[in-house]
Amino acid sequence: MALIEKYVPAFSFNERHAIQVDAPGDKVLDAILSFRPEDDRFFRLMITLRELPMRTVRLFGGGGQTTPKVFGIDNFTLLEHDDQEVVFGLVGQFWRPDFGLVRIADGAAFAAFQRSGFVKLGLNFTIAPQSDGRIRLTTETRAFCPDRGARLKLLPYWYAVRPFSGVIRRRILAGLKRRSEAAGSQPPTGP
């Protein structure tokens, strides 16, 4: 059973992308665990545009003078990983200008979280060895809306951001492929 099934077995929305990687599975897993999507210029541009309403309100008199940290992987909680899959979780009201995020401590807290009006989002990366020696790297995003109100609020947001989200996911996969293949081509070190 995939780990994401443990955390988001039912979902209201999902998106899936995959890429072939010419690197050992452990190098792919290392790349996943150390990835920083906010290092990608396109990701930063899309997040800057997404956060523009919130930052404008803060700048012109609402919510104080402090500028919030840019949204990135640190907003997610690493829920669990093994040698085939890594699962991150995020809880919030993503249609709100500030994302309406709820800090989640760990996988158990994510699994136990149940509050009307909040969406649970799972993001995973799975590696599957292929018969030709390559790795099929897949990412899936699942959003679970616990009630009709959350689903109706997330629906327009999901379809508005989905094209950009798809580009971001494909860029993440391409970046993970580059990093994994570069690490896989390095000669081993040590005695």
Image: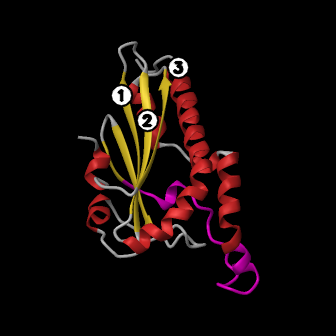
Q: Earlier in the sequence, mark 3 or mark 2?
A: 2
Find residue 33 and report its horizontal and vertical position in percent.
44, 42
> Are the two marked residues, 2 and 1, in contact with CB atoms closer than 8 angstroms?
yes
Mark 3 to mark 1 CA distance (whole Å): 22 Å
Q: Is residue 135 above or below residue 138?
A: above
Marker disc for residue 128: 1
Name the residue nearer the viewer: 119 or 78.
119
The 10 Å Cα crowd at callout 1, few under 14, some 14 to 19, many 20 or more, is: some
Q: Which residue is outermost to the right?
A: 60
Which corner quadrant holds the C terminus?
top left
Find residue 38 and report its horizontal and vertical position in percent.
61, 51
Is 37 on the left-hand or right-hand side of 184?
right
User: Residue at position x 64%, y 84% from top?
Assistant: 63
Mark 3 to mark 2 CA distance (whole Å): 24 Å
Q: Which residue is outermost to the left?
A: 1
Give the residues drawn in magenta, as a range. Answer: 55-78
The amino acid marked with disc number 1 is: Ala
Q: Is residue 183 above or below residue 158?
A: above
Q: Is residue 164 above or below residue 17?
A: below
The 10 Å Cα crowd at callout 3, few under 14, some 14 to 19, many 20 or more, is: few
User: Residue at position x 60%, y 58% from top?
Assistant: 160
Find residue 12 and report its horizontal and vertical position in percent.
39, 58
Disc 3 on helix, strand or loop?
Answer: loop
> Are the two marked residues, 3 and 1, in contact with CB atoms closer than 8 angstroms?
no
The amino acid marked with disc number 2 is: Thr
Q: Earlier in the sequence, mark 2 or mark 1?
A: 1
| Residue 145, image quadrant | bottom left
Disc 2 on helix, strand or loop?
Answer: strand
Residue identifier under label 2 = 138
| Residue 134, image quadrant | top left
Marker disc for residue 186: 3
